[in-house]
Image (cartoon, rainbow, N blue to C red):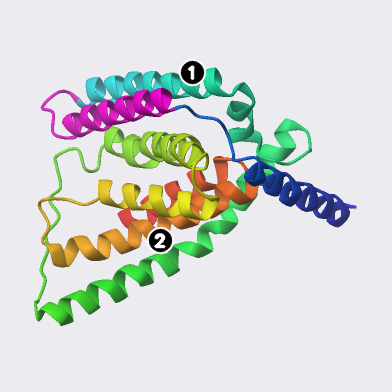
Amino acid sequence: MLAHTIQNETSYNIQHVLNAQSSGGAQISAPMILTAALIFTLYCILMAFLTTATMPLLLIFGIQIIIFLATITLLACIIFIENPQLLKKMFVGSFSSHTWIAIAINILIGLSSFIAIPYVHLIFAMSFRLIATMTNNKINVIISKTKNHNSIPYFFNIFVATPIIEECFFRGILQSFLKKYFHAHFAAIIHSIIFAIMHLSILYPLVVNIPIFCTIFSLSIFFSILYETTGSLIPSIMLHVMYNIFCYL
């Protein structure tokens, strides 16, 4: 019975995804994508400021929660205005089961996608070694840690807020917008390039930024595959969280 149910769900899901791709995906307008980009940029600036702020940690945590809730609400409003059905689809996905069953299936898919993390890390290690060899450099990069590195605000930012906000913007909004003009494959590549560039740092030399770019780009492709396959952001959010935990450890 369980195997039959999963088979039916998978068949329905694949057909639903193919139909969505053939119809050009969700309709997100240019003004809305610009508004969403502005909101996302403001979110990044405020969160970056809070990581170095000299305020009580409890106050920082409270401000973080307010910023996170405000940002996710504004992004959700943009999605709802453009396509109300898309907002529900981002959580339930393309499965035909009851809402909570569909969410549970997406959670299981997200947990099982943990297997992708070692491959992504291997890409970083290989590209880092290749670039270092080509440039004949011995790289010794020290990543600075702020006083809040092991605090609740820091954990909330990298394990909860940022994965959710980034997935909602890049996969949920930007990728849906790009699919109006490009095939899903090209849309994934374009927004993954933007996603990877966003994670580069002017504090690192090129020999370090190139492996970071390759790694984040590959990771973003995994996120896109999960989103396109399931129609839900839950699996990509969970993989994003697990990857951040993996990097922290």
Q: Callout 2: helix, strand or loop?
A: helix
Q: Which residues are magenta?
A: 30-56
Coordinates of residue 80 in the picture (x, y in percent): 55, 20
Name the residue furthest right. 1
- Estimate the spatial distance between the alpha carbons at disc 1 and disc 2, rounded to whole Å: 30 Å
Q: Nearer the viewer, residue 25 or 97?
A: 25
Circles 1 and 2 in contact, beta carbons < 8 Å = no
Residue 247 on the magenta span: no
Coordinates of residue 112 in the picture (x, y in percent): 59, 57
Name the residue furthest front. 181
Side (left or right) of 142 relative to 179: left
Side (left or right) of 109 relative to 178: right
Q: How many marks?
A: 2
Side (left or right) of 166 relative to 90: left
Q: Give amino acid for label 2.
A: Ser
Q: Give amino acid for label 1.
A: Cys
Question: Quick check: can you spot residue 249?
Answer: no
Q: Tell me which corner region of the image, top left, top right, bottom left or bottom right, holds residue 40.
A: top left
> Which image quarter is the C terminus in?
bottom left
Say few, some or many: other residues with alpha carbon within 10 Å of mark 1 (under 14 / 14 to 19 / 20 or more).
some
Q: Callout 1: helix, strand or loop?
A: helix
**Residue under the image location 22 percent in, 52 percent down:** 200
Q: Which residue is denoted by mark 1 in the rendering?
A: 77
* Main SS of residues in magenta: helix
**Residue under the image location 17 percent in, 50 percent down:** 201
Residue 46 on the magenta span: yes
Q: Which residue is denoted by mark 2 in the rendering?
A: 218
Indicate which disc, 1 or 2, sits on the residue closer to the N terminus: 1
Is 135 above or below relative to 39?
below
Coordinates of residue 166 in the picture (x, y in percent): 39, 38
